[in-house]
Image (tube, helix red, strand yellow):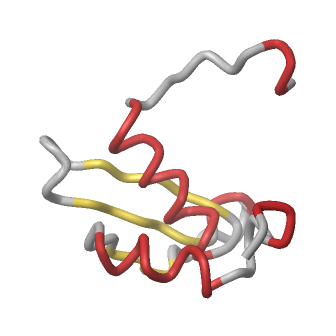
Amino acid sequence: MELWEIGSDNDWRFFGPIIEREWLDITPWPNDSREDMRWHCQQHDSGGDCAQYGPTPLIAAMRCYVASKLGDEIDVPEELK
């Protein structure tokens, strides 16, 4: 699979193995007022609890994965903005 073929919020072929390998726990998060917080993802064994939210299960999971590896805040290079 080429990188350009990967959808950021709908490609379980790519992200599913990461979720399984990293033991990411994804659950619906009832929130009537925030569309961007419909799903909750938590990883308990990342050196401390890591929790993130997102509008889809995969976005919440990948936010949690990145936060577990890089921390809650990262600097995005200018060329990627």
From the top left corner, tell me how far across and down residue 64 is, in percent: 44, 53
What residue do we see at 34% from left, 80% from top?
Answer: 20
Q: In the rendered view, tell whether residue 7 sits above or below residue 44.
A: below
What residue do we see at 50% from left, 65% from top?
Answer: 61
What residue do we see at 62% from left, 61% from top?
Answer: 54
Relative placement, left or right, of 51 versus 56 is: left
Residue extending furthest toward the front: 1
Residue extending furthest toward the bottom: 13
Taking depth in this image into account, of 80 and 60 the one nearest to the observer is: 80
Taking depth in this image into account, of 30 and 80 the one nearest to the observer is: 80
From the top left corner, tell me how far across and down residue 65 is, in percent: 42, 54
Quadrant (top left, top right, bottom left, bottom right) of the C terminus? top right
Taking depth in this image into account, of 69 and 38 the one nearest to the observer is: 69
* Rendering quarter of residue 67: top left
From the top left corner, tell me how far across and down residue 22 is, in percent: 29, 67
Relative placement, left or right, of 22 versus 55 is: left
Quadrant (top left, top right, bottom left, bottom right) of the N terminus? bottom right
Taking depth in this image into account, of 29 and 18 the one nearest to the observer is: 18
* Rendering quarter of residue 3: bottom right
* Rendering quarter of residue 77: top right
From the top left corner, tell me how far across and down residue 56 is, in percent: 67, 73
